[in-house]
């Protein structure tokens, strides 16, 4: 991916967020999971009893966690517009010197692409009903 081009980054962000949700929920150190020869499959099998643990099941588990967190935030009244970062982090105003000189990040486009990848409505935050069913969350999210 091109470094400062948002194209394709929503899906990549969704996958990385799902991975992080799984690692956090498992209580595993991110450094071990990402950089060391940590036996994550064996660990998760021992903890959960799950037999078939491929990357798809890992990501879907993380996706379910992220969707449940999002549903909780919606229930508590949060909207997509409530999630912001300080303008300085976006490069507003842009730096006048250094490697990030004149760089501004299009955070709204990145957020929109992430919401689309997660099947969340960008304006309301509503979760697509089809996605809820695909994730097996019908009995939890209504």
Image: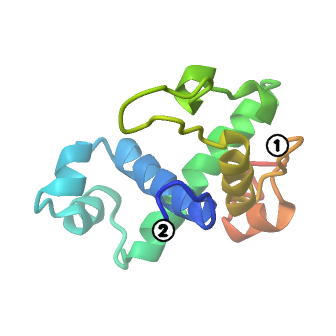
Percent x, y of residue 89: 53, 27
From what the image shows, is residue 106 above or below residue 89? below
Q: CA distance from mark 2 to mark 1?
A: 27 Å
- Judged from the image, the secondary structure of the residue bearing numbered disc 2 is loop
Q: Which numbered dot is residue 125?
A: 1
* x 37%, y 79%: residue: 52
Render colour scheme: rainbow
For marks 2 and 1 on the same chain, the one whose residue lies earlier in the sequence: 2
On screen, residue 107 versus residue 19, left or right, reads right
Work out which residue is located at the far right of the displayed protein and give it: 124
- The correct choice, above or below, for 21 with respect to 118 in the image is above
Question: Which residue appears farthest toward the left when viewing the image?
Answer: 37
Element at badge 1? Answer: loop
- In this view, the residue in front, 15 or 22, is 15
Determine the image quadrant of residue 114.
bottom right
Q: At 78% from the left edge and 24% from the top edge, which residue is drawn?
A: 76
Instruction: Decide if residue 67 is in sight here.
Output: yes
Where residue 107 appears, as percent x and y from the top left, is 66, 40
Q: Are marks 2 and 1 in contact (CB under 8 Å)?
A: no
Q: Nearer the viewer, residue 56 or 139?
A: 56
Mark 2, residues whose alpha carbon is within 10 Å: few (<14), some, or many (≥20)?
few
* Relative depth, front residue between 26 and 115: 115
Label total for image: 2
Q: Give the residue at x 22% y 59%.
A: 43
Residue, disc 2? 1
């Amino acid at each position: 991916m091109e470094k400062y081009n948002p194209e394709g980054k929503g899906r990549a962000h969704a996958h990385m967020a799902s991975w992080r949700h799984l690692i956090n929920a498992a209580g595993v150190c991110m450094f071990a999971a990402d950089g060391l020869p940590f036996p994550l499959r064996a660990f998760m099998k021992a903890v959960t009893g799950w037999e078939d643990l491929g990357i798809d099941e890992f990501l879907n588990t993380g996706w379910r966690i992220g969707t449940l967190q999002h549903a909780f935030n919606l229930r508590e009244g949060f909207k997509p517009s409530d999630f912001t970062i300080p303008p300085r982090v976006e490069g507003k105003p842009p730096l006048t010197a250094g490697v990030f000189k004149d760089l501004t990040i299009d955070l709204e486009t990145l957020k929109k692409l992430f919401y689309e990848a997660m099947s969340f409505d960008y304006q309301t935050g509503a979760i697509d009903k089809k996605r809820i069913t695909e994730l097996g969350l019908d009995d939890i999210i209504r």
